[in-house]
Amino acid sequence: MSEEQVTTQPETNGQSAAEVVDDTVEPVPPDPTAELVARLAQAEAQAAEYKDQWLRATADYKNFKRRADIERGELIRSAGAGLLLKILPVVDDFDRAIANIPPEIVETPWWGGTQLIAQKLRTLLESEGVKVIETLGQDFDPNVHEAVLYEDAEGQDGKVIAELQRGYRLRERVLRPAMVKVGRG
């Protein structure tokens, strides 16, 4: 054999090249702990995802319940507001009748009973949260006043100088704005 052939051929100790390769590569048995660790990591990620979804669903439910309670309360208040708006003209009629009663009727028991009915009606409105909007001498506020007339009044510019129809609030909301006469000048 030549020198080149000896150096290029691996020493096989009488084995073929295929046998030499098989001896150097041994099959690696699968590691059961590595597989379990991977499955555990996957299960933990899935559990974290489920927990996040559960927390979001819980928050969504709480928000829905809060919105539904608010809407239910507003619906009840608005339903009551419709009825109260229908009662206000009756209150206005009682107030006009009281203001224009003839002197001979004032002392009769019938009139005292009529005034009691008007007082009960006002008490009922107050118990429902209805309050009269103060107008005379106040600055004109378009949120609570409806200007029907403007009249020249020295030193009363932008002030309410007369109330033509009472206005009412239902708690914080304007139920009916007051019709007023506003001064100019």
Image: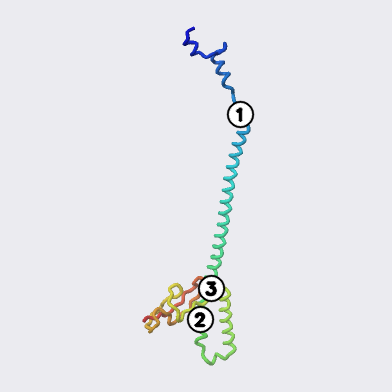
Relative to 28, residue 5 above or below:
above
- At mark 2, the secondary structure is helix
Query: Between disc 1 and disc 2, whose residue precedes?
Result: 1
Is label 3 in a helix, a strand or a loop? helix
- Amino acid on which disc 3 is placed: Leu
Between tags 1 and 3, which lies in front? Answer: 1
Height in image: 135 above or below 67? below
Q: Disc number at residue 30?
A: 1
Label 2 sits on residue = 93
Q: Residues under labels 2 and 3: Cα distance?
A: 15 Å
**Residue type indicated by callout 1:** Pro
Residue 51 percent coordinates (x, y): 59, 47
Q: Quadrant of residue 28?
A: top right
Name the front one of labels 1 and 2. 1
Residue 146 image offset from top left, x and y in percent: 43, 75
SS state under label 1? loop
Q: Residues within 10 Å of mark 2 (few under 14, many from 20)?
A: few
Q: Quadrant of the C terminus?
A: bottom left
Residue 67 appears at what percent x and percent y? 54, 60
Q: Residues within 10 Å of mark 1 (few under 14, many from 20)?
A: few
Give the CA distance from mark 1 to mark 3.
Answer: 81 Å
Between disc 1 and disc 3, whose residue precedes? 1
Graded by Cα atoms within 10 Å as few (under 14), some (14 to 19) or many (20 or more), the crowding at tag 3 reads some
In this view, the residue farthest toward the top is 1
Q: Amino acid at mark 2?
A: Asp
Name the foreground residue: 103 vs 29.
29
Residue holding disc 3: 84
Snapshot colouring: rainbow
Q: Residue at x 57, y 58 (%)?
A: 65
Residue at 49% in and 78% down: 134
Position of 165 with respect to 62 (left or right) is left
Mark 3 or mark 2, which is nearer the start of the sequence? 3
